[in-house]
């Protein structure tokens, strides 16, 4: 383990660099609890229930706001002091912030997703973090990118999931592909003054592991996903007739030992909230299962939620994936839209859609999910419905009745950019397409004798 300077940055930025050695074998890097660890690496040995050939994933964490003094870190043979970020970053150059530092340590494995988390889920973090990763195949460093520091895809504040021990706050994670090093730049507010960093601030580097190929594609009654069968309600059309084909949890390699075993359900679905994962668009469709495994691990192991927050996910090729466990035919209570997780479904488009064109295949899949999930309650995707706010952290005080389109964007309920300007602009066409799917299924339905 070594500490060396990097290229000079602005005097008010602190830089940490963590590199994973490709040839690292059994190097154990840890930190004493008494010193408030600066680097902690943890790998989970459990494999997925249906993943006999799977390689387990893992999460490595790096503390960015640890003890006031240096933390002691155990290397292979020596102990060396590592720099820690100060509790407060200031725009005025100080002895603590004027020297950019480069921290390197052998992690022992690679990672593909990066997120930032902190102790208090109600605390916030300004856009103070920039990062750069080293590509494992080429050894080249990427340019500096902002790391999302806000994520309102979360459980309602008074729910059992949100109040469970260990639940953390965090930003939306970023998919970075196969990487083995990261540099972090903590930049003070441009307005000057000081801004306290939330306690327990850390980076989470997620390795999605490897699932057994190929992913099975099945309908909503797939046995691999183990949903509970439900008796369909009397309706003008059978929702199963318009249900999309989807990849089950077993198909994308979910480690079922990782999630909470108690399943939570809600009432009939009255609205579908559209999200983007904000994980970036630098993934191939073949990598989508790995992206989902990474998000799943981040939600469960980093944020300490019960399961992945979304009910369904869609990749850029239009493939639909089962999200939160409990049965795709059922109304599973998710953790996707703060204040409005009751009687709703959260569907996430994998990627970032703040600009550019959203793939048509993705839009078509979103429309089909909306048509399917709204059908049992006889709700037209173009209609408006009334929901009750369950959390004042949303746009509306807890208890207020709010009218939403049956297909709405995350930003309609919470002060966020999600699902991105481009995807949000496509919501009217998604509503129209979903209504046409419902109408077509109704016409094709047999007339009762």
Image (tube, rainbow, N blue to C red):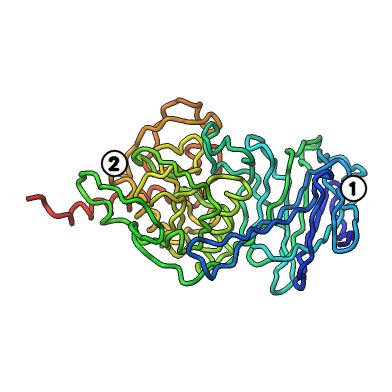
In the image, residue 191 sits, relative to residue 27, either above or below, namely above
Instruction: Specify the quadrant that holds the N terminus.
Output: bottom right
Residue 16 point in image, percent of width and height? 81, 55
Residue 394 seen anywhere in this rendered image of the structure: yes
Instruction: Classify 10 Å Cα crowding around label 1: few (below 14), some (14-19), many (20 and above).
Output: some
Residue that sits furthest to the left in the current view: 449
Residue 377 - label = 2
Q: Which residue is mark 1?
A: 98
Q: How many marks?
A: 2
Q: Which mark is residue 210?
A: none
Q: Going from the N terminus, do you reach mark 2 or mark 1 first?
A: 1
Residue at image position (49%, 59%) is 357
**Where's residue 237, x and y in %?**
21, 50
341 left or right of 83 in image? left
Whole-angstrom CA distance, mark 2 to mark 1, is: 60 Å
Res. 268 image quadrant: top left
Residue 368 in the image: state x and y as whole percent: 34, 55
């Amino acid at each position: 383990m070594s500490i060396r300077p990097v290229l000079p940055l602005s005097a008010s930025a602190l830089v940490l660099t963590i590199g994973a050695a490709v040839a690292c074998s059994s190097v154990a890097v840890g930190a004493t609890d008494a010193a408030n660890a600066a680097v902690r690496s943890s790998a989970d040995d459990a494999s997925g229930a249906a993943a006999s050939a799977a390689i387990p994933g893992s999460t490595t964490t790096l503390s960015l706001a640890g003890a006031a003094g240096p933390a002691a870190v155990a290397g292979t043979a020596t102990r060396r002091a590592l720099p820690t970020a100060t509790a407060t970053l200031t725009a005025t150059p100080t002895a603590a912030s004027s020297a950019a530092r480069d921290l390197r340590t052998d992690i022992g494995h690679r990672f593909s997703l990066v997120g930032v988390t902190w102790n208090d889920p109600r605390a916030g973090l300004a856009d103070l973090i920039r990062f750069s990763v080293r590509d494992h195949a080429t050894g080249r460093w990427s340019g500096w990118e902002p790391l999302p520091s806000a994520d309102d895809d979360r459980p309602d504040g008074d729910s059992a999931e949100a109040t469970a021990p260990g639940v953390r706050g965090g930003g939306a994670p970023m998919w970075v592909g196969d990487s083995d090093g990261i540099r972090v730049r903590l930049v003070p507010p441009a307005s000057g003054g000081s801004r306290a960093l939330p306690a327990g601030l850390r980076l989470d580097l997620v390795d999605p592991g490897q699932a057994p190929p190929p992913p099975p594609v099945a309908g909503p009654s797939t046995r691999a996903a183990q949903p509970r069968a439900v008796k369909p309600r009397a309706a003008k059309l059978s929702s199963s007739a318009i249900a999309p084909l989807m990849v089950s949890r077993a198909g994308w390699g979910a480690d079922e030992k990782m999630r909470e075993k108690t399943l939570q359900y809600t009432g009939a679905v009255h609205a579908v909230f559209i999200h983007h994962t904000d994980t970036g668009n630098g993934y191939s469709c073949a990598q989508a299962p790995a992206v989902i495994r990474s998000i799943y691990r981040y939600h469960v192991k980093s944020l300490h939620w019960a399961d992945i927050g979304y009910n369904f996910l869609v990749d850029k090729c239009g493939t639909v994936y089962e999200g939160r466990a409990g049965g795709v035919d059922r109304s599973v209570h998710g953790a996707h839209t703060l204040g409005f997780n009751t009687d709703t479904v959260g569907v996430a488009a994998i990627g970032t859609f703040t600009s550019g064109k959203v793939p048509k295949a993705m839009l078509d899949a979103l429309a089909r999910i909306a048509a399917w999930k709204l059908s049992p309650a006889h709700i037209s995707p173009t209609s408006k419905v009334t929901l009750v706010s369950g959390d004042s952290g949303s746009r509306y005080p807890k208890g207020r009745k709010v009218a939403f389109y049956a297909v709405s964007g995350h930003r309609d309920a919470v002060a966020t950019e999600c699902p991105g300007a481009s995807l949000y602009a496509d919501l009217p066409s998604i509503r129209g397409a979903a209504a046409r799917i419902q109408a077509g299924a109704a016409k094709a339905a047999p007339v009762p004798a």
